[in-house]
């Protein structure tokens, strides 16, 4: 696929994509290997919603990620794996080796009865086998559902059950910094509640003692010995599901966002090449985890579709010391580096001595994703990591969008700190006011919607199409609503200001306040809770929980501990509140709705200017809360 190489070409391409979107995307799609070509490019209606791309086209995404590179690039390295412990050996996997390993594991899945359309859950650390297992599912047309390995047994079980997965792939344990986590034990706890799992395949990573249930649990290394390393890929329809990935919303349980094969493939490669301006011999490194969408699109699919060499890292940025990211950049001569603002801020706190120790001159492009990047972090990244020579691409997108929608193109689009800048060709953003009317012109602010489909957009919420319609397509009929607030400045550049719903973004992880509340409420002494986000120096947003307790004699410190443990058990440690305030009442309207707006202000440290409180049932509650706020 040819990439855009100047700003005037970007403008041309953008115009082409508006004038004739179908022709525009058909041209991009034609650079892939299709078993048979589509007969219609697009069918859509944001009312139902129906979104179909490359209709009737047949393909398998793994043939595009692997097979098509074999002839000319079989010996090229696909994955450079860096283990958690820098003293352990790294691993190099070429495209032809990866092809074999994927085929081999796909055969294992077939041996365990997996079929096209089955759901397979992956609960694994950042090891090459996670990429292999992901692609093996895609190879046989099974729908992968990767669950971040930091989630609790309860969260894992909920996700497995929501999509009735029949196979779970996991490891004995995982390493993260100086911690060793027994994943299999967590998986075992989850599987007690999962009736649909027939096989659990376990890769040996740590070698720790684990229990293996006969007839259900199988070692990866035993299973691969029984199969061949070749397998013709299953033919998929362009609109067959490729994967489900759970993400949090304002209300209810996490939603299984579904992406389909053809459109996702086209947009993953298109956005990867253009945003990062990927060149044939570049070394690319995205520090995300495959358990999130960034890992799906920009560790697994985008880079492999482009035939690139990527670094994959098992560990954390501060182990064995806060220079680890920069050490890895130097070791592999990384050209394109993609991380989250929370990591930048965390490393910034250790000063410049760590990055100074390493030669970072190979870097050309620095990416940011997952949350708004504050100005200070932007400048620190630009100066101390990029040596003011790199282009900083602040990429805005979501699990639902499948790929980056608004971002500078590296070294092409003028950058502005904190601005995601301009939409990629094919993307039609608009800002709307409270009445749902589109706000025209520049120098304006509103809620961010997208008014025309793009190939990698969400197709449905697995098992609940109505919820998909309600959450994304009903609030502003005829448009996809992102849930984000946004400014458009006088140059027409976009700046994302953060979520306008009850979703908070903690260290780049998306969390529903209701989800955290449900976790807290599981504690037997909790009567009610209300959770809001507040500005946090490193995490972007922290979690502030206001909790009403039953009368009891347990000490407050003990209760705090217990509640944190409950949340870890219910969701995982990423959902642990940073601050807990025990209160006797919550500000509610006469109809019983909690006024989070007020709680948010108090959590931000605001004690006056709380806005209109006249609809409150008991305004005195607020004084109480302010008096005891932390
Ligand atoms: C936020 C992550 C500002 C936003 C890819 C969005 C951002 C949510 C940016 C999606 C950015 C992501 N600037 N905010 N560059 N990128 N966000 O689904 O609020 O985990 O709605 O996808 O993260 O989070 P998700």
Image (tube, rainbow, N blue to C red):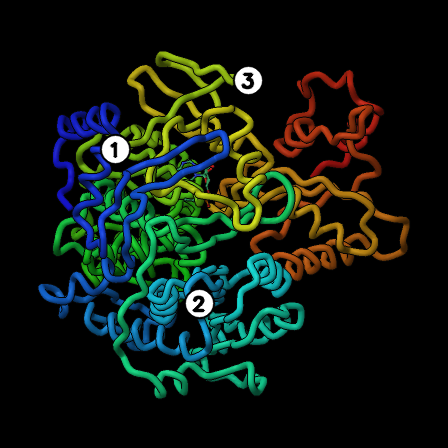
Question: Among all residues in the image, which is located at the extreme left?
Answer: 72
Q: Is mark 2 within 8 Å of ligand 1?
A: no
Q: Position of residue 440 (x, y in %)?
A: 39, 13
- The CA span between labels 2 and 1 is 39 Å
* Residue drawn 30% across the image and 35% down it: 407
Q: Position of residue 217 (x, y in %)?
A: 53, 81
Total residue callouts: 3
Question: Among all residues in the image, which is located at the extreme top?
Answer: 441
Q: Is mark 3 within 8 Å of ligand 1?
A: no
Q: Secondary structure at mark 3?
A: loop
Q: Secondary structure at mark 2?
A: loop
Residue 12 or residue 77, whichever sits in front: 12
Residue neighbourhood size for the residue with mark 2, other residues' Cα within 10 Å, grouped as few (<14), some (14–19), many (≥20): many
Q: Secondary structure at mark 1?
A: helix
Q: Position of residue 140 (x, y in %)?
A: 36, 67
Question: Would you say residue 314 is visible in this rendering?
Answer: no
Q: Is mark 1 within 8 Å of ligand 1?
A: no
* Residue drawn 79% across the image and 43% down it: 528
Using the image, determine if residue 275 lies above or below residue 32.
above
Instruction: Please give left or right for residue 595 compared with residue 360 in the image.
Output: right
Using the image, determine if residue 299 lies above or below residue 605.
below
* Residue drawn 18% across the image and 45% down it: 30
Which residue is labeled 3 in the image? Answer: 434
Name the N-terminal-most of marks 1 and 3. Answer: 1
Which residue is labeled 2 in the image? Answer: 125
- The CA span between labels 3 and 2 is 42 Å
Residue neighbourhood size for the residue with mark 3, other residues' Cα within 10 Å, grouped as few (<14), some (14–19), many (≥20): few
> Marks 3 and 2: CB-CB under 8 Å?
no
Residue neighbourhood size for the residue with mark 1, other residues' Cα within 10 Å, grouped as few (<14), some (14–19), many (≥20): some
Give residue 136's quadrant in the image.
Answer: bottom left
Between circles 2 and 1, the one closer to the viewer is: 1
Q: Which mark is residue 22?
A: 1
């Amino acid at each position: 696929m040819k990439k855009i190489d100047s700003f005037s070409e970007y403008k041309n391409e953008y115009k082409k994509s508006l004038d004739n979107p179908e022709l525009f995307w058909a041209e991009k799609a034609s650079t892939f290997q299709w078993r048979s070509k589509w007969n219609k490019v697009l069918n859509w209606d944001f009312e139902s919603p129906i979104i179909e791309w490359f209709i009737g086209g047949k393909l398998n995404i793994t043939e595009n990620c692997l097979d098509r590179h074999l002839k000319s690039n079989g010996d090229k390295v696909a994955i450079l794996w860096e283990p958690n412990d820098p003293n352990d050996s790294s691993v190099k996997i070429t495209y032809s080796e990866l092809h074999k390993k994927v085929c081999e594991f796909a055969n294992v899945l077939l041996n365990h009865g997996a079929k096209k359309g089955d759901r397979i859950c992956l609960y694994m650390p950042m090891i090459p086998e996670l990429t292999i297992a992901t692609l093996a599912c895609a190879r046989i047309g099974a729908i992968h559902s990767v669950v971040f390995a930091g989630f609790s047994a309860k969260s894992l079980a909920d996700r497995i059950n929501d999509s009735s997965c029949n196979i779970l792939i996991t490891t004995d344990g995982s390493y993260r910094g100086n911690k060793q986590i027994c994943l299999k034990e967590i998986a075992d706890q989850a599987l007690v509640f999962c009736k649909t799992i027939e096989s659990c395949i376990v890769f040996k990573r740590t070698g720790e003692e684990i229990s293996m249930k006969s007839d259900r649990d199988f070692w990866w290394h035993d299973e691969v010995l029984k199969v061949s390393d070749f397998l013709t890929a299953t033919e998929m329809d362009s609109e067959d599901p490729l994967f489900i990935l759970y993400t949090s919303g304002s209300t209810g349980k996490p939603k299984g966002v579904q992406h389909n094969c053809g459109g996702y493939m086209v947009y993953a490669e298109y956005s990867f090449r253009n945003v990062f301006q990927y060149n044939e011999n570049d070394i690319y490194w995205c520090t995300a985890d495959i358990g999130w969408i960034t890992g799906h699109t920009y560790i697994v699919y985008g880079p492999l579709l482009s035939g690139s060499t990527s670094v994959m890292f098992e560990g954390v940025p501060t182990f064995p010391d806060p220079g680890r990211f920069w050490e890895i950049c130097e070791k592999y001569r990384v050209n394109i580096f993609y991380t989250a603002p929370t990591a930048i801020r965390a490393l910034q706190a250790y000063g410049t001595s760590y990055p100074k120790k390493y030669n970072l001159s190979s870097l050309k492009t620095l990416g940011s994703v997952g949350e708004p990047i504050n100005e200070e972090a932007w400048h620190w990244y630009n100066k101390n990591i990029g040596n003011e020579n790199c282009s900083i691409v602040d990429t805005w997108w979501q699990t639902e969008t499948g790929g980056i929608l608004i971002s500078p193109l590296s070294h092409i689009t003028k950058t502005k700190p904190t601005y995601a800048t301009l939409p990629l060709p094919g993307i039609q953003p608009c800002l709307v006011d409270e009445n749902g009317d589109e706000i025209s012109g520049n120098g304006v602010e509103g809620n961010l919607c997208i008014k025309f489909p793009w190939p990698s957009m969400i197709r449905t919420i697995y098992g609940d199409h109505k919820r998909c319609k309600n959450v994304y397509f009903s609030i502003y009929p005829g448009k996809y609503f992102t849930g984000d607030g946004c400014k458009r400045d006088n140059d027409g550049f976009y700046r994302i200001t953060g979520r306008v719903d009850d979703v908070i973004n903690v260290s780049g992880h998306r969390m529903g306040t209701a989800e955290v509340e449900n976790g807290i409420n599981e504690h037997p002494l909790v009567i009610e809770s209300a959770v809001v986000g507040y500005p946090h120096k490193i995490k972007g947003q922290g979690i502030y929980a206001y909790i009403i307790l039953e009368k009891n004699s347990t000490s407050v410190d003990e209760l705090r501990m217990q509640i944190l443990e409950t949340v870890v058990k219910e969701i995982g440690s990423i959902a642990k509140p940073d601050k807990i305030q025990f209160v006797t009442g919550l500000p509610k309207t006469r109809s019983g709705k909690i006024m989070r707006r007020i709680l948010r202000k108090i959590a931000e440290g605001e004690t006056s200017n709380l806005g209109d409180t006249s609809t409150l049932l008991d305004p005195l509650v607020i004084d109480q809360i302010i008096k005891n706020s932390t």
